[in-house]
Image (tube, rainbow, N blue to C red):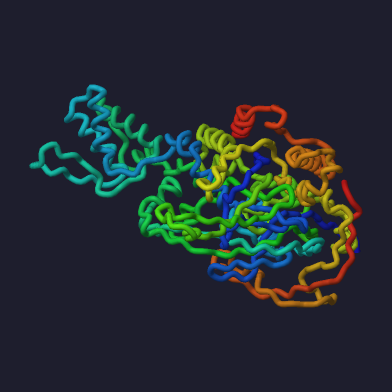
Amino acid sequence: MMQPHLVFTLAATMAAMGDLAGHERRGSLLWPGRSAILGLMGAALGLRREDDFSALDAVSIGVAVFEQGAGLRDYHTVETIPTAVAKRPNSRPQALRADPLRNNTTITLRDYRVGVLYGVAVWGGPLETLCTALNSPQFTLYLGRKSCPLSAPPGARVVLADGPEAALTKMILPPWFAGRSATRFITDDDGTGGHVELRHDAPRDRQLWHFAPRRVAFHTVDIRPEGGA
Amino acid sequence: MTTFVQFHLLTAYGPSNPNRDDQGRPKQAMVGGSPRLRMSSQSLKRALRESSFFALDLADHAGTRTKRLHEKLVEGLVADGVALAEAQKAADQVAVIFGKLDTPDKKAVDAKTVATTLAFISPDEWALAHDLAAKAAAGEDLPKDKDLKKLVLRKADGAVDIAMFGRMLADDPEFNREAAVQVAHAITTHRAQAEEDWYSAVDDLNKAEDTGAGHLGEHGFGSGIYYQYICVNVDLLTANLNGDKALAKKAMAALASALPVTTPRGKQNSHAHHPMAYYMRAERGPRAPRDLSGAFFTPVDARLRDLGANDLQTASIRAMDGTVANLDKCYHAGAAEDYRILNALTGEGTLAEIVAFAEGAVA
């Protein structure tokens, strides 16, 4: 059945897609999960972290993996000063100089994926609004961490197609990825097959950071975007 | 609609080690299957915050934390010719806005009235407090309590570096700031790897023969042309500064001036690296931001013929310009966004133009 789909490109030289995180280690998934895409669309719409994202809960999302990139682990030091020592500082240097003996320096390890390319299909929501927002967003879009800018515009467009896989053939590939095809497509499990895994990333309460399990289906596909604009 | 300003810089670094990994070598990354040198976003932001442009140009926009507002108000009024007793009465009324005042010790000579707690007072608030005290001293009735506070108190928020690079206070989320400036990791535009320097040091006081070195060591370094990308959400920057557009302009100018001459300082005394960007592209507009790292996805040293260049500097510029044109063709029907260029290889463009262009984004 033909229905409208929003398709857009996510390309980045460095990306980080939060896996389960604990303490000083931050891993990365090989593709952006549902919450990552919702966050990105929320930023485009101008939703702040504390705002209500529930309007986006209705949309269905599928991600095609064109290039999952190479792993990179960054070593990173973090310096913190107890807030009791530097209350309402004017600037970070000022806070850190308030009492150098009480600064805490710790090492963190953060994983990135280098040179990634994904195609995202969205259906069943305010697609035109999302499309406009993605092409001229309210907040800066990035893939996982703020230090991971997109290396191509999202190039969002709404297309009529018989399913997300067909819709994704209408997405725009960045010039340096011309001719690429996707072999994996990841979406919510709708009982149509594929390999199914359970992930705990369906938000129940964003303020309290509560997540419910979600069944994710991995499909083997062959998506070949037709090319440029 | 949001206005974004994007900066793209190409900077050649000689042998140096500005940002080290856990082994002490320059940070690296594999991009497009080829090894590159890298500088982390974090190290670049710290270098910017610590740069003289932020320290000097924005000095007036750092607030002060003090208990001595009362004393300063009295001094100011007396200097304006107000009698001491009048000045103190006026200052009593105004200084209390920032917190309770201690009663001065009547027996002490030259006792000053000070606040019981430190208050953070922004430059604007200083000026407003002084004006109000002058009015009070001139005999005007001041509004009471809440209305009086509203006249002076601002959400103390003139801190430009926090408005730019954000802040997360777990204990005090009300004072969190979403960073308005996005800084990417910088990578070399071409294949480059860290090298090892093996070195020895001799003991100056040991003149006996055949004693060898007093110290052996190894030290990593690397060299290359780094591509650096910075994206400013101008609307968010202004909002983070409480809508103070004059200050947002100043912040944009400080950032644009600092970018091409600022470097992380790791091992600077060993390498004396003080590079300046040789190419800088600034863009502004409402389009979804994108960096131009795709230009270097295939390293430029592997594309010299294709780019019609004999050297890495020119090749990097051509790769970047070509990618801008191609992205505009694929995504924006060939229309370019407003931009300015500085090219120190050909002497084209000036930093002053780019600074003015960046300031102009604050509408």
Q: Is residue A123 visible?
A: no
Q: Nearer the viewer, residue B150 or B232?
A: B232
* Residue at horizontal 83 percent and vertical 42 percent from the top: B326
The image shows residue A110 at horizontal and vertical percentages of: 60, 63
Q: Is residue B347 above or below residue B161?
A: above
Q: As displayed, is residue B192 above or below residue B106?
A: below
Q: Is residue A199 visible?
A: yes
Image quadrant of residue B121?
top left
Left or right position of B357 against B242: right
Report the residue that reaches farthest toward the front: B209
Residue at 14% across / 36% down in the picture? B110
- Left or right, residue B164 beside residue A59: left
> Residue A98 or B85: which is nearer the viewer?
A98
Q: Quadrant of the N terminus of chain A?
A: bottom right
Q: Residue at position x 80%, y 58% from top?
A: A119
Residue most toward the left? B107
- As drawn, is B272 to the left or to the right of A81? right
How far across and down, in percent of the image, does residue A227 sit? 89, 51
Please name whichever residue, B328 or A191, is drawn nearer the observer in this view of the structure: B328
**Rendered location of residue A166, percent (x, y):** 89, 61
Q: Is residue B131 left or right of residue B71?
A: right
Residue B298 at what x, y percent from top left? 79, 51
Q: Count the marks: how many?
A: 0
Give the residue displayed 77% in from the left and 56% down from the top: B32
